[in-house]
Amino acid sequence: MPLHALSSADAAISPAERAMREDLAAAYRLVALYGMDDSIYTHISARVPGTQDQFLINPFGMLFRDITASSLVKIDLDGNVVGHSPYDVNPAGFTIHSAVHAARHDAVCVLHTHTVAGVAVSSLSDGLQPCNQWALQFHNRVAYHAFEGIALDHAERERLVADLGPTQRALILRNHGLVTLGRSVAEAFILMHNLERACRVQVAVQGMGQPVNPVPEAVCELTARQYASGDTNRLASAPTDPYAREWRALLQRLDPPTATSFRA
């Protein structure tokens, strides 16, 4: 199924919203491709361009591998469907996303996963450890939120937002999973991909029962700043969005007939 199989009924969608839908559909497919999905659960949400209170999210009951641009549902901050859609959504599942979007207007995209490695690390008292290069991207740059049961209670949103803070782009939900925030869909996905791999390495290292080679604090901070600057993914002679180059490459992992139709 094409990633952005928009029908004639979608003709009123603005170019900006169409582009956002295409990127979001791609992110859903990539999460499935990299094994970070959890059946029909978890979500990736994206703010509709030009709005502060409208968002795109997956239909409830559809596998991530099957998401298309046109199947994405437009909702408000309470999870109510905006306009017309043949699909249902899971308003309760939007609890975490709505809290983050409402508090952090820089959060264009919010991505939440329940992976084995992510849940494992979230269940450790010490959380994410600076034991590998991917993890160092998040050194002193990841927030934690205590487990309060399945995230259905809207009263939890205030506490979650307080734990997240005003600048963090990664959140570990204790005994639950991982969340990343992006100023674009590309950023949210790439941050999650790196955070997931950091967790996988940590689980593997801790399972070996051998001492971990320590990284000096100064090197940890240097590495985190290198990631934050974008210099790891950008040519000095051609400054641009530090996530754009990798995002274009990732899109090629999807079905070739659809991947090539994304804008350059």
Image (spheres, grey):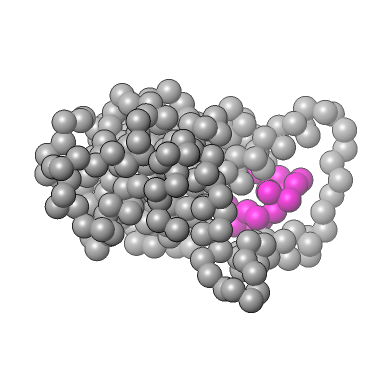
Q: Is residue 109 above or below residue 42?
A: below
Q: Based on the displayed image, in which of its 4 quarters is residue 233 positioned?
A: bottom right
- Specify the quadrant of the image occupied by residue 183: bottom left
Residue occupying image coordinates x 52% and y 32%: 33
Q: Let me know if residue 155 is in the magenta part.
A: no
In-front residue for pair 163/139: 139
| First to last magenta residue range | 128-145
For image coordinates 31% across by 47% down, the residue present is: 21
Which residue is found at the position 71% from the left and 32% from the top?
Answer: 203
Q: Residue at x 73, y 51 (%)?
A: 133
Relative to 4, is 221 above or below?
A: below
What type of secondary structure mainly makes up the magenta span? loop
243 or 172, which is in the foreground?
243
Res 49 seen here = yes
> Which quadrant would the N terminus be assigned to in this image?
top left
Please, is residue 203 above or below residue 236 in the view? above
Image spot of residue 13 (x, y percent): 19, 52
Q: Quadrant of the C terminus?
A: bottom left
Locate residue 162, reporting x and y percent. Answer: 42, 54
